[in-house]
Amino acid sequence: MDNKHITTSIFLATLMLVSLFAVVSSAASVSGTTMAGTGPAVTSTQAGNLNIFAVDANGVLWNTSVMPSGNGLWKSLGGVWTSSPAATSQNNGGMTVFVRGNDSAVWYRDYVQGSWGKWTWGKWTSIGGQIAAGTGPAACSWGAGRLDVFVQGTDGAIWHKSYNGTSWSGWESLGGKLASSPAATSNTTNNIQVFARGTDGAVWQKSYNNGWSSWNSLGGQVAAGTGPAVSQDLWVIVQGTDHQLWQKVAGDYGAAWRTPGSPPEALTTASPAATLNVEDHTVVVVTTTSGNVWSSTHDVSGNFTNWSSAGSPR
């Protein structure tokens, strides 16, 4: 065989190998999926972007920003975590995300503006605590510098820890006998609403208004292994035992739960997440059995009819 044929053969073989490698690499790059049993977190910033967080099958936390100026790409925030995340934004434009670590403690990471005006993620920091296995934290903020974190402890009670802009408080028990990750929101200063699934399967609520109320039942039947979500306008959203979404306004104890619509793919056994967007409409975010993250915004009738997939963390 002459040198020309040898050179041509080597080139063709190399081209085939490169093409095969590209196919394999492409398949691997789209194989991301959410960790089984974990749901997403969502928060809305002043700029109007929805920031969605999800933990992948390897325990790594990812973030994507969508609508109106986010690019929809997933970015790794690192770590190896064991729960659904929780996220909250503050009126200074910052965000904080929380998650359960391998040590069962609460870990958080801040998105803050540096001295040169550039927004960056800080380092992971532990605030201790012992979160029940299979559950994750909840978080809310009523103003710049204020953070409130809630977990289900290993005793089944809800525990609370707060940050006042300078230092963290100790952990305090809010009592109760709960059976899920909590959800929390605040829509005004010195006001907090906390929700969780009770051992009876119903949604239970506890309020703070310069002092904590007792626990009150909102009824409903929440799927085992999941907990409620709540937006700042107090729409409580759960996955029912029929594995469809159900919703109710907190405080309207006599109102019936109703189905607002579910995504085109089957829900995973995981808690939904909710927030208000810049137009003051409730947005719900869920994970599905395909490993994808889906979101929808209340229409004028308070239903979730138009669903959008953010793909999966990768």
Image: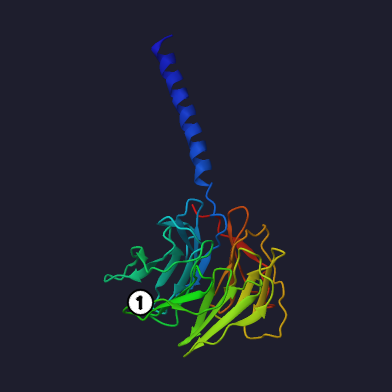
Residue 224 image position (x, y, % from top left): 64, 64
Q: Nearer the viewer, residue 156 or 243?
A: 156
Residue that label 1 marks: 168
Residue 50 image position (x, y, % from top left): 50, 69
Q: Residue furthest top?
A: 1
Q: Nearer the viewer, residue 23 or 138?
A: 138
Question: Which image quadrant: the N terminus?
Answer: top left
User: Residue 203, relative to residue 133: is it above or below?
Assistant: below
Residue pictured at 54% horizontal, 68% vertical: 181
Q: How is the image coloured?
A: rainbow
Residue pictured at 56% horizontal, 62% vertical: 39
User: Residue 67, relative to residue 59: is it above or below?
Assistant: below
Q: Residue furthest left?
A: 115
- The image quadrant that residue 14 belongs to is top left
Residue pictured at 47% horizontal, 69% vertical: 87
At label 1, which amino acid type do we have? Trp
Residue 285 image position (x, y, % from top left): 58, 66
Q: Residue furthest front?
A: 155
- The image quadrant that residue 4 belongs to is top left
User: Residue 183, relative to residue 308: is it above or below?
Assistant: below
Judged from the image, the secondary structure of the residue bearing numbered disc 1 is loop
Please say whether residue 25 is visible from this viewpoint. yes
Please say whether residue 148 is visible from this viewpoint. no
Q: Mark 1, residues whose alpha carbon is within 10 Å: few (<14), some, or many (≥20)?
A: some
Lateral position of residue 273 relative to residue 201, left or right: left
Residue 25 image position (x, y, % from top left): 48, 39
